[in-house]
Amino acid sequence: MKSGIHPDYPVSTITCACGNAVKTRTTRGDFSIDVCAACHPFYTGKQKIMDTAGRVDRFKKRYEKIGGKR
């Protein structure tokens, strides 16, 4: 690698709103985020399905009609 052309790549801390902190290397420096893998509903299994006007039930009925029973 050529010397003098690459940016600094120091150890940085990324902090989530839930309190989770991850140490990594970045040119950006320390920063905070709103959601991480430790608190995101998709990854934690606490995801809620918002059923607006019965859309989930209509989808399930339609899916069963075409032979998609599980």
Image (cartoon, grey):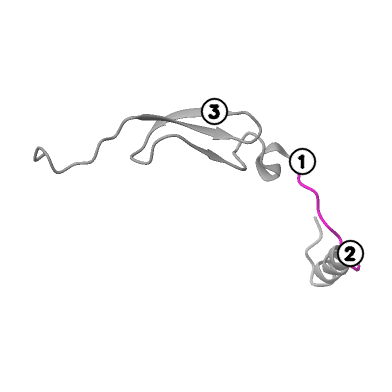
Q: Residues within 10 Å of mark 3 (few under 14, many from 20)?
A: some
Question: Circle 1 — which element?
Answer: loop
Q: Residues within 10 Å of mark 1 (few under 14, many from 20)?
A: few
Label 3 to label 1, Cα distance in Å?
21 Å
- Residue 9 coordinates in the image, percent (x, y): 29, 34
| Residue type, label 2 | Asp
Q: Amino acid at mark 1?
A: Lys
- The residue wearing badge 2 is 57
Q: Contact, CB < 8 Å: mark 3 with mark 2? A: no
- Quarter of image, res 24: top left
Task: Tell me the tag on residue 70.
Answer: none
Give whichever of discs 3 and 1 has the lower sequence position.
3
User: Which residue matches tag 3?
Assistant: 21
The secondary structure that dominates the magenta segment is loop
Residue under label 1: 46
- Disc 3 vs disc 2: which is toward the camera? 3
Please state the extent of the stretch shown in magenta in the rendering.
46-53
Q: Is residue 41 left or right of residue 53?
A: left
Image: 30 above or below 58: above
Spatial CA distance of label 3 from label 2 is 40 Å
For the point 81% across and 54% down, the residue is 49
Quadrant that contains the C terminus: bottom right
The answer to whether marks 2 and 1 mark residues whose Cβ atoms lie closer than 8 Å is: no
Mark 3 / mark 2, whichever is N-terminal: 3
Tell me where residue 64 appears, x and y as whole percent.
84, 66
Q: Assess disc 2: are there few (<14), some (14-19) or many (≥20) residues with their C-alpha within 10 Å of its C-alpha.
A: few
| Magenta span includes 56 | no
The residue type indicated by label 3 comes to: Ala
- Quarter of the rendering containing residue 55: bottom right
Q: SS of the residue at dot 2?
A: helix
Residue at left 9%, top 37%?
Answer: 3
